[in-house]
Amino acid sequence: MNICFDKVEAGRLAAEQAARVLRETIAQKGVATFVAATGASQFEFLDFLTQRRDIDWSRTIMFHLDEYLGLPETHPASFRKYLQERLINKVYPGRVYLIQGDAPDPWSECRRLGALISRVEVDVAFVGIGENGHLAFNDPPADFTTADPYIVVELNERCRNQQVKEGWFSSLEEVPQKAISMSIRQVMKAKNIICIVPEARKAEAV
C-alpha cells in the first residue's frame, strides 16, 4: 500500500507500477492482458499512463470492468466513451473487448465477454473503490460466490448518487438502475491489481 500526498502523485505512482507490469509481462509472454477502470479515480492515472512511451500497446489485450445497462456509447456517462477518449484512442491496444451495455440481451453479452476473458490470463487489473465500497459495480454486500466472469447487477442508491455528485448525470432519475459488471471473483483472478482510491470521501470505504 502507498499513501500519497495528493491524487496527482497517486496517479503518477500507479502509472509507473502499471507500466512496469505491462513491460515485464510483454517481455516474458509476448502479450499482456489488462482490465481498465473508469470514473474520477482514474483521471490522473490514465493521463500519466497514456503519456508513457515505454509500453508496446500493440501487444496488449484490454477488457474493462463495467458499463451501465441501456446506455448508448454516445452518452456522456458511458464508460465505453470514457475509455475511447481517455485510453483507447491515445494508445491503441492490440485487442479491445468492450462491454456493450445497450446490447438487446445483457445476459448474452455477459456470456460473450465471459467466454472471451476465460481464454486468457489477466495480468493486471486497474480498479478503484466507490464511496460505498463498490468494486467495479459490485455494491456491498457483493456476490463472492458466482463463477461467472460478468454479471448483471442492480445499483444501490448510494452508488447512483455518487454518479450524480461526480457530474456524470444531472439527477438520480437519470442514472440507470442496472449494469453489467465484472464479478468479484473474476477481478481477483488478476495476477496483479492496482487499486487507486483518491479523495477523503472514500476513506471510510477503504
Image (cartoon, rainbow, N blue to C red):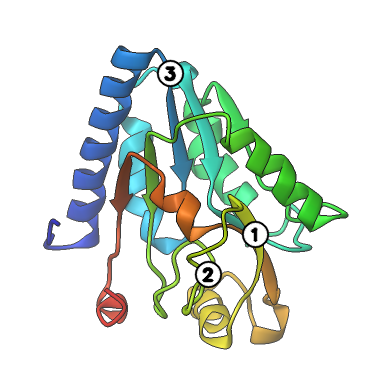
Residue for badge 1: 151
SS category of the residue bearing label 2: loop
Coordinates of residue 57 in the picture (x, y in percent): 44, 22
Q: Amino acid at mark 1?
A: Ile
Residue at 12 percent of width and 61 percent of height: 3
Outermost residue on the right side: it is 104
Residue shown at 27% from the left, 40% from the top: 15
Q: Of label 3 and label 2, which has the lower sequence position?
A: 3
Q: Where's the N terminus, which quadrant?
A: bottom left
Q: Residues within 10 Å of mark 2 (few under 14, many from 20)?
A: some
Q: Quadrant of the C terminus?
A: bottom left
Q: Quadrant of residue 54?
A: top left
Query: Horizontally, is 80 left or right of 105 in the view?
Result: left
Nearest to viewer (mark 3 / mark 2): 2
Question: Considering the numbered disc 1 on the image, is that residue within a helix, a strand or a loop?
Answer: strand
Q: Which residue carries the number 3 mark?
A: 31
Residue type of the residue flagged with mark 2 = Asp
Instruction: Report the front residue among 112 and 76.
Output: 112
Task: Answer with left or right where residue 174 lies relative to residue 64.
Answer: right
Quick check: 121 above or below 99?
Answer: above
**Which residue bears the numbered disc 2?**
143
Q: Nearer the viewer, mark 3 or mark 1?
A: 1
Q: Nearer the viewer, residue 61 or 77?
A: 61
Query: Could you tell me the amino acid type at mark 3?
Result: Val
- The answer for how far apart the CA atoms under marks 3 and 1 are is 26 Å
Asked if the residue at tag 2 contacts the one at tag 1, i.e. Cβ–Cβ closer than 8 Å, the answer is: yes
Asked if residue 78 shows in the view, the reply is no
